[in-house]
Amino acid sequence: MTAGRGIVHSERTGAEARRAGSRLDGLQLWVALPLANEEADPNFHHHPAATLPSLDIAGARVRVLAGTAYGERSPVETFAPLLCADVAMPAGCALPVPGEHEERAAYVAGGSITCGSDGAGPGRMLVFARGADVVLRATDDARIVLIGGTPIDGERHIWWNYVSSSKARIEQAKHDWREGRFPRIPGDDVEFIPLPEEPIS
């Protein structure tokens, strides 16, 4: 999903799945748009798992969710060079992290890994020095997400669900939300979430 100049969406579970109960693990990652694309047209494109590159590297199963990794490119549209890959590492696996991106990190979603003398378990992120040769080792079965890309081109501000290089633009978006100027979710003219009242950081 590209929020661009503003998008409204709702993430919902169908009534049948809610009745039966289910488990969902997930990460939501936000990527700052380059300054030139901050007011891009909002859009959403679904990419089924089968359309995303999947490969085996050193015994790890890697799925390239967005951007590039290990010589593969995801079909997901990005506005700047990006790395986002879901990686399943069996215990004992040693995975080299690609060095093509200026900034790189690994978030541990499950299991545990080591990088040199540093260890990391669930909920920890390892951030790597620019240009360093990095090898991750799974001390048990691990699930990680590799992320990275180019540095953002300037300061960003975040308030609630709004991100911008301009605090004034966020204030305009807040005003537009209060006044109902954002489009409604197709098929839902009822649900509306009021703005929280907090200062912009």
Image: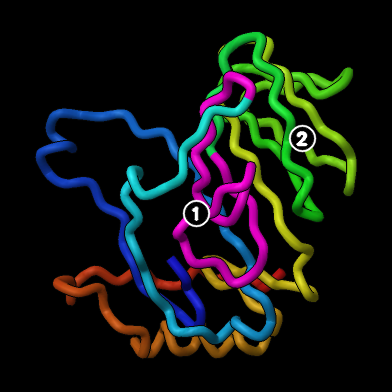
Disc 1 on helix, strand or loop? loop
> Measuring 52% from the left and 45% from the top, which residue is drawn there?
64
Q: Nearer the viewer, mark 2 or mark 1?
A: 1
* In front of the other: 57 or 19: 57
> Measuring 66% from the left and 72% from the top, which residue is drawn there?
199
The answer to whether 35 appears left or right of 12 in the picture is right
Which residues fall within the magenta stretch? 58-85
Residue 61 position in % (x across, y down): 52, 27
Q: Which residue is mark 1?
A: 74
Q: Is residue 81 magenta?
A: yes
Three-letter residue code for mark 2: Leu
> Measuring 78% from the left and 45% from the top, which residue is drawn there?
99
Q: Quadrant of the C terminus?
A: bottom right
Asked if residue 170 can be seen in this view, the reply is no
Q: Is residue 136 magenta?
A: no
Asked if residue 130 can be seen in this view, the reply is yes
Vertical comparison of 113 with 22: above or below = above
Q: Which residue is mark 2?
A: 126
Q: Are marks 2 and 1 in contact (CB under 8 Å)?
A: no
Q: Calculate the distance from the C-alpha at mark 2 to the C-alpha at mark 1.
A: 23 Å
Vertical comparison of 118 with 52: above or below = above
Mark nearer the N terminus (2 vs 1)? 1
The answer to whether 133 appears left or right of 27 in the picture is right
Three-letter residue code for mark 1: Ser
Vertical comparison of 44 with 56: above or below = below
Disc 2 on helix, strand or loop? strand
